[in-house]
Image: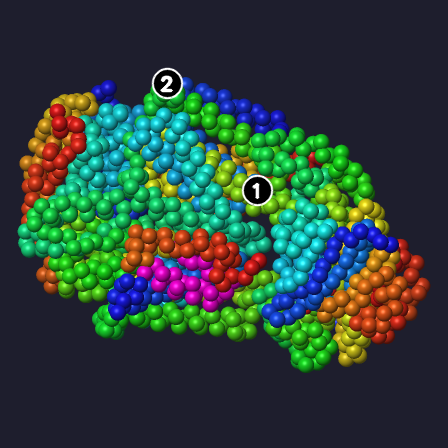
Amino acid sequence: MEIFGIPHQAFLGQLMLGLVNGAFYAMLSLGLAVIFGLLDIVNFAHGALYMVGAFAAWIMLDSWGVNYWWALLLAPLLVGVLGVIVERLFLKRLYGLDPLYGLLLTFGLSLILEGVFRRQYGVSGQSYAVPELLEGATNLGFMILPNYRAWVIFASIAICLVTWYVIERTRLGAYLRAGTENAKLVQAFGVNVPLMVSLTYGAGAALAGLAGVLAAPVIQVTPLMGSNLIIVVFAVVVIGGMGSILGSVITGLGLGVVEGFTRVFYPEASNIVVFVIMAIVLMLRPAGLFGKEA
Amino acid sequence: QNNAGPVRIGFITDMSSLYADIDGPAGAEMVKWAVQDFGGKVLNRPIEVLTADHQNKADVAASKAREWIDSQNLAMLIGGTSSGTNLAMAGVTKEKKRPFISIGAGSARLTNEDCSPYTIHYAYDTVALAKVGGSALVKAGAKKWYFLTADYAFGHSLEADATNVVKANGGTVVGSVKHPLNASDFSSFLLQAQGSKADILAMANAGGDFVNAMKAAKEFGITKQMKVAGLLVFINDVHSVGVKNAEGLQVADSWYWNQDDESRKFAKRFFDKFKRMPSSLQAADYSATMNYLKAVQKVGTTDADKVNGELRSMKYNDFYHKNATVRADGRMMHDMYLFQVKAAKDSNTPWDYYKLVAKVPGDQAFTTPAESKCTLLKK
Amino acid sequence: MGKAVRLTYLALLVLALVAPMIGLYPVFVMKLLCFALFACAFNLLLGFTGLLSFGHAAFFGFAAYVTGWFVKAQGWTPELGVLAGVVAAGLLGLVFGLVAIRRQGIYFAMITLALSQMVFFLCLQAPFTGGEDGLQGVFRGKLFGLFPLVDDTVMYYIVLAVFLACFLGILRIVTSPFGQVLKMIRENEPRAISLGYQVDRYKLLAFVLSSSLAGLAGSMKTLVMKFATLSDVHWSMSGEVILMSLLGGVGTFFGPVLGAGIVIGLQDTLADKVGEWVTVIIGVIFVLCVLAFRKGIVGELLAWRERRRARKS
Amino acid sequence: MATNETLRIENLNAWYGESHVLHGVNMHVGEGEVVALLGRNGAGRTTTMRAIVGLTGKRTGSIRIAGKEAISLAAHKVARLGVGYCPEERGIFASLSAEENLMLPPSVAAGGMGIDEIYGMFPNLKERASSPGTRLSGGEQQMLAVARILRTGARLLLLDEISEGLAPVIVQKLAEMIRTLKAKGYTIVLVEQNFRFAAPLADRFYVMEHGKIVREFAQHQLQDNMSMLQEYLGV
Amino acid sequence: MSAEIILETRGLTKEFKGFVAVNNVDLTVRRGDIHALIGPNGAGKTTFFNLLTKFLPPTRGTITYQGQDITNEKPAQTARRGIVRSFQISAVFPHMTVLENVRAALQRNLGTSFHFWKPEKSLFHLHDRAMQLLRDVDLQDFAQELTVNLPYGRKRALELATTMALEPDLMLLDEPTQGMGHEDVHRVTELIKKVSAGRTILMVEHNMNVVSSIADRITVLQRGAVIADGPYSEVSKNPQVIEAYMGATDAELQGAH
Ligand SMILES: Nc1ncnc2c1ncn2[C@@H]1O[C@H](COP(=O)(O)OP(=O)(O)OP(=O)(O)O)[C@@H](O)[C@H]1O
Ligand SMILES: Nc1ncnc2c1ncn2[C@@H]1O[C@H](COP(=O)(O)OP(=O)(O)OP(=O)(O)O)[C@@H](O)[C@H]1O
Ligand SMILES: [Mg+2]
Ligand SMILES: [Mg+2]
């Protein structure tokens, strides 16, 4: 049996692999969307935070012998705290200004973070071993799927769903959404908005950090791992439209899959396929697939 | 040119970016070590080392080179990593007529279509890597090849060069897949390779791409089905991948720290300072500086043309290479090696990664005069 | 224009004219002028239209390649090569514009960034760019087939003339009837629409003008440096040009020139001193600018003068 | 009277960035009182309200709410003292449905109105409950803005121009509502352009001009002050 | 009066996800009238305006302007035909002078707005006309002032001057006196009357004092549909209007204002 001219086994295989990649896009664009939502800041440092998350896991293992499962908890926490500090120290001063300044500031921050890690650890990259529990691979019949990758898909979808639920279906989420539009007024209703904002940035950062830890065993942990990814994630966000959380998750997963298939049909274009899709989507739906018209 | 004042040697490399580990600040230190070991003086003039970070930007490299030559009366320039910057520096030094030793550039253009009477290409080039990797493996029975190629100029030329070698030695290429630069995920490319039933998977990529591809290959069990060859792999990359993952990988290089006593001596000194072993480029940095100073000593002047002439006629003998010479096109002709990464259990000391598979003499490793477009060779 | 400002401009002009005579390194000054022009072109968009493009390196770098290729591989004269570069950048700008102009603010920034990344990959893979080695050995040739440009001094005056012409041109664009509309768009876009202006077309023209000028800067740079490389199209170059404008003063005329001078000068001097810290230093400057120095150097000076004047009256 | 005073403002100064808007405002509102704040456009009435809840820039002076000093409290702490604020610009959230908007403000005290009671008062809102907040018509948004603070149990209500943009029939309903609230013992500060709406409702009146209170009088003095109001408001 | 009809809608309808905001409205506006549109909140008045100015596409129905079907045109096209909508107060260019604000509107008809090579001087001849317009709204003394510094009422006046600079044939005003003090309400009412000479005005207004004093004709919308249409004196006695809009208690159409 063949689908689109490729054997159906390979097709399913590529689909699974696309999902793995999409899982990272989804988690990163989710964090971006959450931060953008409440702070009106396009967090350019998101890629750098993702990198810091991966490094944190690696350092924990390398220097203190902290295992993967603890790192999965501790590293995002650490990145989250870093995020809160950044928000309190820098971003706080930018509220009420043109959102472009937030973009530029976080761009500067990403350069600093990247530079410091590069200085400290070089660029050639560090290896992070797959945790023992998830070693090996499962034969799905149509492909051999390493267990770890299956776990990545599962974990990230679970995280995305939880985040979506919190934001769209809970009271806290309603505060967040309202705070996005008029934080001062929400505060005047009795909600501790400054705290909420710091924690939101922290949570967005932690999501990036978590994605970093999940990615560490799959790819090389290098200071540059975030800066290339972030641009693709931006495109994902533009395609999905920042309007909806679920939108960014679905778009992220979907584009991962599309990119995966491009690698089979026309690998030369796999780097730019996301950007091409972005251009097309913008032509047809300027607000993005899930965005609300302004 | 004046013959007073300090003798200035310039070293421009990537100190902070993609290739900083294989050369970078440690490479600069090697140049300084050579100067120190030489005695800090030549022809009774103090030797000064100028270093700069080109950040992988050709224009930074070129402007720095130009500025040093114009305002500091630079005697000789050493170019570190990255082809683009080295080609740019070669352009400047050709115009300004100064000896230029390119260490870490991969592109064979430096001694081929873009050759210059002032350039010496010191360590390796992609043609040599392809030839060394290719011919030895095909001879060892790996007939069916599949390429995983980085989709840009250097990847393409590596693949093309290797393909020629494979075919010339009676092998076949059953397929290839191109992956983008800095791809974060190689699994789907590898899935395609897996379906090819080739004997050998050749990775025509470098640095982070190679490392990620290698790790994924291990994860998906490809290393069990076929051999893997890295066409441009430095020891630092193997270190990154981890011996466990890289086991069995075939690698071509111009030098390995554990190849003989002299090398080990150099490596130990390096290790004491940097807590890692030197790459072939770092070794070449030292060697090139030392040999340049010897040439200056011999001709008794820093006059660019005279020193350049000596550099192109002398014999090179040190821990880095034996009986090597520079061809008219600027190509340093020396032995190249094919190594195999040891099994994890056989790797006894830190960074003890390779065992020697084959040694290929320079005239078989590099572009032959017949293949070359360099006019300097046709004279 | 105040007297002090006029005198400053005059002094700078004289300095620029005699630069090669007083031992300023012409290639460096030319490079600086190219980047200054690039920053001015960028500022036309950010400072005077209110659009932050995070992808301007695409125009700069792509034009650099186009010029390089026509001059080197096709043997075109330099002025034709430059023209080709400018046209190519303008067309690319048109395409970018058509896509990006549909969204505002930070979306615009992200879209231009993404599109420029696409151009980067195209340049990396296209057969004529020399990939990561770059397009090397582009000779300046003879202007109009007559005047050889190998001499750095001759080249210098040509670059200076081009720069001055463009600088004045931008001044004119900003104050022209068209510039007035751009100002309206920046101030209150919905209002401009309700007055019957088809703002997208104005933005598009501004974008094309800016990208063409950025292309001109890139083309000139190819001739000056004799090569075009990937770093010219990389997104970090877009970041640099933003930094130049921000540091010098967004929306001021001279700010981007000053900013370009500082950033390029810094990169050049830092190259042999701090090595690995370059990115960190650039990042710190970015953060400082945004936090404490939003108007940029020229902007702050102007504001200071304004305040002093207000206090006097 | 001092013991059951809900709001006392003394020498309140407030700024928006550089610009100094309030210049020493003094006023007090007793528990259960309805007070109207009158003045021309730009007199500083909205600013006074915003200063009370902590939404202006810098503030100095004293604001006592139910006896507690609130001048240096952050906005959310002020609200928890039992203050409900209905802003002039309505502040309806686009990303929340009408009902979510209604349910948004956390309750700050017991005794707020129930949802059915509110829908009974404003049937339009019930009909549009699931529409995104800003898709409501101008008047519907105005109703929503008032309705949502009635839920919170706040006993001090700051209502800024609530009759604006409403059809006369609704304005009458609002007047009834304020009477009901007053009967229930709520304390209300009304800022109104619409003098005819405010006049019959308020127990006392303050007139503002250039960021200061310039007159104060009670309901029974209304007739005597008409000529003064004429001068200040052009009524 | 058999005055010419400038604007006509036939069966104009707008639905939002099944909710009918404007329902089959047939409306005719005569040239030269001040035509008021009133109705309870949520009746669909703003939506109707949005349909006329093309900010929203209609679900059904047609719009005819001076005999031409303009149902499917773009907002900017409609604006150039002379249908201009006056915005709320934010509709000025805050960091341009009052004069430049008016010039911005005059400039459009010059046809040189894409000329990026012409000097600013080429616009100076518009200043006379701009000053004249400012005089019309009594703003001549503020010509060189930055617009941010103007008080509320004057911004409205400027907004009107700018709108008039577009030489509109038909002006649409949505609650022009909303949020104004009595003085300003009076001022703006007078201003509207003044500028209505030679043009047509369609306005939404809840302030019945304003409506009764200047409107030639009134249309009442309720739940998206027209329930009454005619001169003020007629409509104000319509019991359905009193019931729906004024509240049953108020027999007089005096309004709460
Ligand atoms: N955000 C702000 N920034 C700067 N100045 C402001 C701001 N808001 C209001 N002002 C100024 O403060 C003064 C008082 O405004 P305020 O809104 O309190 O008046 P108001 O009495 O409520 O009048 P209105 O009828 O216009 O609502 C005005 O001069 C106004 O221009
Ligand atoms: N974009 C939209 N999506 C959904 N419903 C809408 C939308 N716009 C308006 N409505 C609904 O259509 C109805 C008419 O709204 P409109 O704004 O036209 O009323 P209006 O007559 O201007 O009222 P008001 O006097 O209160 O301003 C309202 O019930 C509103 O909720
Ligand atoms: Mg007010
Ligand atoms: Mg309305």
Image-quadrant location for residue C83: top left
Q: Chain of mark 2?
A: C
Q: Which residue is mark 1?
A: C202
Q: Which residue is mark 2?
A: C146
Local SS, label 2? loop
- Which color scheme does this rendered protein use? rainbow
Which residue of the protein is positioned furthest toward the right in this rendering? D224
Q: On the rendered structure, is B152 left or right of A29?
A: left
Q: Could you tell which of marks 1 and 2 lies nearer the N-terminus?
A: 2
Residues shaded magenta: A232-261
- Percent across and percent down for residue C210 are 49, 38
- Location of the C terminus of chain C by quadrant is top right
Q: Nearer the viewer, residue C247 or B145?
A: B145
Residue situated in front as seen by the camera: C133 or A32:
C133
* Amino acid type at image mark 1: Tyr
User: In the displayed structure, would residue A175 be above or below residue C301?
Assistant: below
Q: What secondary structure predominates along the stretch shown in magenta?
A: helix
The CA distance from mark 1 to mark 2 is: 39 Å
